């Protein structure tokens, strides 16, 4: 696992071991960042269920102004901390070792994010819970992009009722990236161009 592009290109990152760990492959990560490349420079990036921190660190390498990583597992958080130090990204990064929802509450009123990436455990509807929480939050900038990584076939039929729209979907063999924005009722623009 490595940083693919940007100022920290080719730096290798530590990974986590274990059957429950499913790090995003370099190919999928490259596809993801090709899709959002224009959104990343200068952005505030929130990496929820951060694992090894590779997505947030890729964003920093590609010009994100600041990244916040949230990971409850102490072992994973140590991996993120080591990767932040290895990439010399301490000034652009903050790590919160706590439950995602406790972290969101602690960030409220202190940050606003342009991009939120979440890769929760599959099949537990944690992405839905996070989206419903964020709906009432001030953490999202007006045109913020939320990317949820989920298992193929994950039900997202609730998005419209929750005030969101699915602006893009990128399917892979076993999972999918869902690109989500808040609906813009007042402007009548539901396209969410990015």
Image: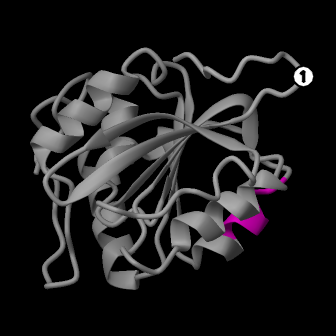
Q: Which residue is mark 1?
A: 186
What is the span of residues highlighted in magenta in the rendered image? 103-108
Residue 67 among those drawn in magenta:
no
Percent position (x, y) of residue 117? 47, 48
Percent position (x, y) of residue 174? 18, 60
Disc 1 residue crowd, few under 14, some 14–19, many 20+, Cα 10 Å? few
Question: Nearest the camera: 113 or 187?
Answer: 187
Left or right side of 57 for 92: right
User: What's the image's color scheme?
Assistant: one colour
Residue 107 among those drawn in magenta:
yes
In the image, residue 90 sits, relative to residue 23, either above or below, namely above
Left or right side of 146 for 189: right
- Outermost front residue: 157
In the image, residue 192 sits, relative to residue 27, either above or below, namely above
Report the number of discs: 1
Percent position (x, y) of residue 78? 33, 73
């Amino acid at each position: 696992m490595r940083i693919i592009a940007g100022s920290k290109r080719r730096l290798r990152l530590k990974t986590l071991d274990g059957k429950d760990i499913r790090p995003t492959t370099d190919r999928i990560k490259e596809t993801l960042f090709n899709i959002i490349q224009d959104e990343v420079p200068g952005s505030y990036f929130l990496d929820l269920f951060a694992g090894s921190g590779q997505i947030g660190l890729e964003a920093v390498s590609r010009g994100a102004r600041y990244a916040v990583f949230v990971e409850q597992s102490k072992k994973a958080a140590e991996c993120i901390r080591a990767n932040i130090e290895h990439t010399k990204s301490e000034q652009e990064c903050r790590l919160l070792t706590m439950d995602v929802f406790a972290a969101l509450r602690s960030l409220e009123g202190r940050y606003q994010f342009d991009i939120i990436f979440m890769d929760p455990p599959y099949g537990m509807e944690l992405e839905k819970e996070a989206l419903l929480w964020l709906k009432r939050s001030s953490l999202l900038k007006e045109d913020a992009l939320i990317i949820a990584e989920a298992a193929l076939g994950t039900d997202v039929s609730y998005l419209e009722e929750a005030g969101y729209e699915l602006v893009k979907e990128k399917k892979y063999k076993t999972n999918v990236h869902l690109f989500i924005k808040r609906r813009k009722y007042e402007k009548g623009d539901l396209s969410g161009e990015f």
